Amino acid sequence: MAIITLTTDFGTKDHSVGAVKGRILSEMPAVTIVDISHNISPFNILEAAYILKNAYHQFPAGTIHIIGVDSEPSPENKSLIVALNGHYFIGGDNGIISLIAENNSPDNIAEFNVPNLVRNSFPVLNNFCVVACHLARGGKLEVVGKPITKLKDVKDFEPRITNNGNSISGNIIYIDAYGNVVTNISKTLFEAYRNGREFEIIARREKLKKIYNSYNEFIDFDLSTNQRKGDGDFIALFNTTGMIELAIYKSNLQGAGSAATLIGLKYQDLITINFL
Amino acid sequence: MAIITLTTDFGTKDHSVGAVKGRILSEMPAVTIVDISHNISPFNILEAAYILKNAYHQFPAGTIHIIGVDSEPSPENKSLIVALNGHYFIGGDNGIISLIAENNSPDNIAEFNVPNLVRNSFPVLNNFCVVACHLARGGKLEVVGKPITKLKDVKDFEPRITNNGNSISGNIIYIDAYGNVVTNISKTLFEAYRNGREFEIIARREKLKKIYNSYNEFIDFDLSTNQRKGDGDFIALFNTTGMIELAIYKSNLQGAGSAATLIGLKYQDLITINFL
Amino acid sequence: MAIITLTTDFGTKDHSVGAVKGRILSEMPAVTIVDISHNISPFNILEAAYILKNAYHQFPAGTIHIIGVDSEPSPENKSLIVALNGHYFIGGDNGIISLIAENNSPDNIAEFNVPNLVRNSFPVLNNFCVVACHLARGGKLEVVGKPITKLKDVKDFEPRITNNGNSISGNIIYIDAYGNVVTNISKTLFEAYRNGREFEIIARREKLKKIYNSYNEFIDFDLSTNQRKGDGDFIALFNTTGMIELAIYKSNLQGAGSAATLIGLKYQDLITINFL
């Protein structure tokens, strides 16, 4: 059964998500619809890209991903179909798909070429669903899209190598449900410059000298030492998106607090790693 | 595969929605369950009606819509099955289905007539699911319902024509995820009284003299003019529910603000259109 | 079609839930995935147990329930597969499954015994999904689990019988979407000690002398009396989870207020019942 995913800033209260699902099921009863997220901050293309980039590759090849963020077509925001890494992405040419692709070249980039395109403020409902169902039925991309050569190029913050290769300066690119902060410094980049050296990660007034591979790796489970660290400690780890993340161990936004609230880290804040 | 939708004020944290889906799947494994919304404000029948009215007709004919808002049966709130426009609605006789029907006469109105009705505080789980699955299996409405003649009549705010047909006074009936405000003045009503005249829309201290058909229609994409309007401007448009909506272009509740926060517009506030 | 449910503290904004669903559908396209809740408070095992306990038994026997709360494996938190009442539970040995089981003995308790277990911070994605899909395909538990003898024993607050059987002291164990508060005093316990006596329920400064079986049972629908009680009154009822609940009739967190906000009742607060 074909799979269509939805990533939007529609929220889950309004009629929008329900209407879209109804339209898809009317077009094509035998389809699996999966919500990636409907809580993207309004018009936030960086957030939409971050979330979908870290979810889409878990789906089977051939999955169709509808992106309902900043999707209203305009001369500067054409509606696109992009084939990338075996998946289809349908959304505006606003940079989201470009950010998801990163350095990978799409296999195919096409702008919508559909008769009877509806021009109103709900293109996801009126146009994206039609194109998604065409692809979900195994229809050819060429029937609904006209090839174009490139995506609008948008860049997120990128880490800088400074101090003659002795420092990496990065930024916080996402704050997750636990208030943990994700940086744009990847494990790959970190290891490429580390060369076995000691290091310190500087986040506001805090310094961290170790990066764990999981939250619990931080804990000394040998109770005999009686020096057990635990809830509330501030740690760095390589998270499962491949990036360096700063976290409060078992953070709780409603209780003890999180990396965001306790350390005062905000979106886009500077994080520096100095190799010693 | 039969489709059952859910529109409730249960929220998405509690066990309620999960329990209802489990019950439906126990009764009938091969059914598609779709969430319209579980974030209706508690007991808010106007909001429930607005959201479901704008979503249900996108679903295929025969879809069964369970309404879990103010659904506990009482002498004044009978549990109903209503056939309307090819869809089934199951909910209390509290005005929601009446508001959805508007001026359309239902094809069939029946109150529950099921042996072993459970009398407790969770009728959606115990009774609505059973009736919904009966219909989803193709069972006849007559087997589970006893015909009654009319729905409880509830009216939402309605726009008034004033000033000898030179003004329309309406109200804000919904504030959406972006903080845009939806009025109860439809494009149809507006055009019926406009007769080609200029007009002004008055919303608190703001005046608008144009209504767009999409958000981007407002933007002058001819960059040579160097007078580009954009993010943060206050505009009116005919939205895709057929109503006049007042919006901040690319509003962001977490950033610049929205029509609700910037202009100070609240639910039920008066919106006046004067034809000039 | 096999059913896999998800109960997590991942929230619905991040990529986590989408990634998990993608992984499951990649392993096994013909499966029904149902969200129980993704809004468990972070690391709150009592809340997770309360919500899943009240939802799981509505699903058909054989359903597989993935629990993504405090799930990272450690020497103190083994990843488990538990067969209980005809259902499978997959989660950490952190007390959640123990709390769900209460006094029921699981049919089978096994710790993960899978080659290539991934050790990182997202075991639900990397390990739980694999085990769940094995079971969903009808695979034997013994192939992926090694039997162990018991679950970690965790107890929630339990009601105490005091005053020579003339009082029951309980606690608030959950506050629901309406702000109604659920106590840990069951109808069964209450009736076992009541012996037909009058009683008073004491919740901070409020006293209640009656327990209803539904919200509307409280209302006198005989309008002729002109003494109609209604919205805003404070009542006690036996709710559909079998517990005594204290509620504001038609409470509205955004309007009149709820039992939690109006009466000032908080999680864990003492509730006393005195038999008179």
Image (cartoon, coloured by chain):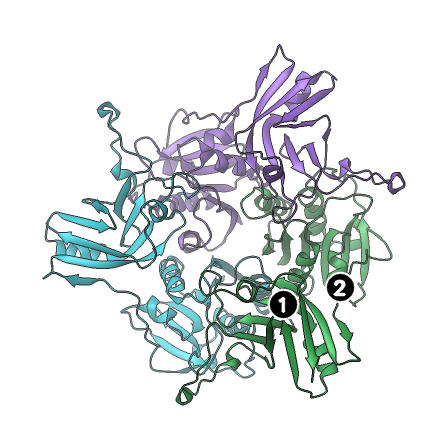
Chain colours: A green, B purple, C cyan
Q: Nearer the viewer, mark 2 or mark 1?
A: 1
Q: Is residue B262 above or below residue C167?
A: above
- The percent coordinates of residue A72 (x first, y second) are 73, 44
Instruction: Name the mark on residue A101.
Output: 2
* Circles 2 and 1 on the same subunit: yes
Up/down of A191 relative to B259, above or below: below
Q: Residue at x 38, y 69 (%)?
A: C96
Give me the residue at 39% from left, 46% from top.
C178
Residue C23: percent from left, percent from top: 59, 68
- Residue C118 in percent (x, y) is at 56, 79
Which residue matches tag 1? Answer: A182
Q: Nearer the viewer, residue B171 or C108?
A: B171
Residue A72 in sight in this render: yes
Q: Chain of mark 2?
A: A
Residue A4 x %, y %: 64, 55
Which three-letter amino acid code belongs to the residue tagged 1?
Val
Marked residue nearer the N-terminal end (2 or 1): 2
Identify the subunit bearing mark 1: A
Horizontally, residue C111 falls left or right of residue A258, namely: left
Q: Residue at 77% across / 61% down in the picture?
A: A155
Q: Is residue A237 visible?
A: no
- Which quadrant is home to the N terminus of chain A? bottom right
Q: Residue furthest right?
A: B224
